[in-house]
Image (cartoon, rainbow, N blue to C red):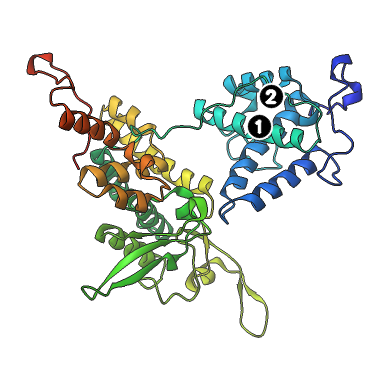
Amino acid sequence: MTALIPASAVAGDLVALGPQSGHTLGPVADDWAAIEVWLSAVADNSRSRTDETVKTYRYHLAKLRWYCEQELGRTPSHWSAQDVKAFKMFLLKLPEWALCWPGALKGDEGYSPFRKAPGASSQADILRFLHALFKALHGTGYIRLNPMVLMKTGKPRRLDKTRAIDLDLFQFVLQVMDNRPSEKQTVHQLYLRDRFIFICLRESGLRASELVGAKMSAVQPFSDPKNRKTYWIFKVAEATAKGGKERTVPVTPALLDALTAYRSAFGLPPLPGNDPQDYGLVLSVRTHPLAAGRHGGTINNAADRRFFGAWRSVGTRFGLHGIVKGRIREAVAALEDAGEQVLAKELERVSSHWMRHTFATAALLGGQDLRVVASALGHASVTTTMVYTEQDALDQIRSWENEHPGSVAQVSVPDQVTPTTGRSS
């Protein structure tokens, strides 16, 4: 580990750096304690009651702190503009030694918060976090100078509508899962759970954080007083929804079938509503210690805990990402074995968030109303959802053509141009 250098030890032009007296953060032991005060304020000032922003900031903070301790040797309050540039270059060309060893956990030898080299959008996210951090430390007087004042803030990542998995490829992933042997109980449970995860992401458009943050009770019946029919819905709770806005997503028959099969494999009633406890929606085959009744003690035998349904939950996006990418890798291997290298390369890029895009694209191309889809996705504005449809282009073209027919140049048959298709409304 590189020793952290105090401000007084840094050469001439850096003596103005470091924590300043008279700042407004209150008593703090060091930079990391100061950052904790800032993160607490971020949580308090959030317009929603969720902590997703703070979780994301902590995710980036872990990388920043590791870099300070393992590479740079200076904490953030001692940074100069050159240090910011060095960190940016470090992210751009992450050295091999900075990657986490396979299977290493925090505290283990070889651990690093960098599981893989960050892509362009991830680098931009980290730098935006750093910009917000230095702005706060400077604004509260904790640092005299903002080392990022010369660096422009990157634009927030734009929704990439091309990141949708082809439906045939999606079915192929399920087919590979279906064809794998699953005689062993835990393997069978994992198969049905993972199948449910894929179908849920594809059929509901949920964010990964919303899926792992949900309880089984999120799937519940809902009666329509108009036709007196009762339907199954998925209620995204305020605590897990991005922006803290609760919403409801209809449950499709395919999703309900996947859920009932998955629940049955874990020894639960097929339908939610009568569970002995409010389980997480995504279960682990691992169990937790179980109290042995009023006489005290715990049930420690794993088989007994499984019998009593003491299931743990998969509660992190990282855990869900590992599940999804693991199944994707199996399907990629099957495509490569079949000589489908192009499709394998395409599928290899897929993540859980791609299935959210797939849901949006398929729903809109299938004729669903734009506002209905925006509501299901939890978009604050239909403008975000319109990216999937090119609806803004359609609206402009139709307005121009209605007012002045022929004012927009049309593609003639000989031009042989493949158009970008917008959904008709």
Residue type, label 2: Met
Residue 390 in sight in this render: yes
Residue type, label 1: Leu
Tell me if 197 is positioned left or right of 285 in this view.
left
Local secondary structure at mark 2: loop
> Closer to us: mark 2 or mark 1?
2
The dot on residue 130 is 1
The dot on residue 148 is 2
Q: Quadrant of the N terminus?
A: top right
List x then y, in percent, for residue 118.
54, 28
Q: Quadrant of the C terminus?
A: top left
For the residue pair 220 and 334, the one nearer the viewer reads as 220
Tell me if 345 is positioned left or right of 58 in this view.
left
Q: Quadrant of residue 226?
A: bottom left
Q: Are marks 2 and 1 in contact (CB under 8 Å)?
A: yes
Crowdedness near tag 2: few (<14), some (14–19) or many (≥20) residues, C-alpha within 10 Å: many
Residue at 28% in and 62% down = 257
List x then y, in percent, for residue 49.
58, 57
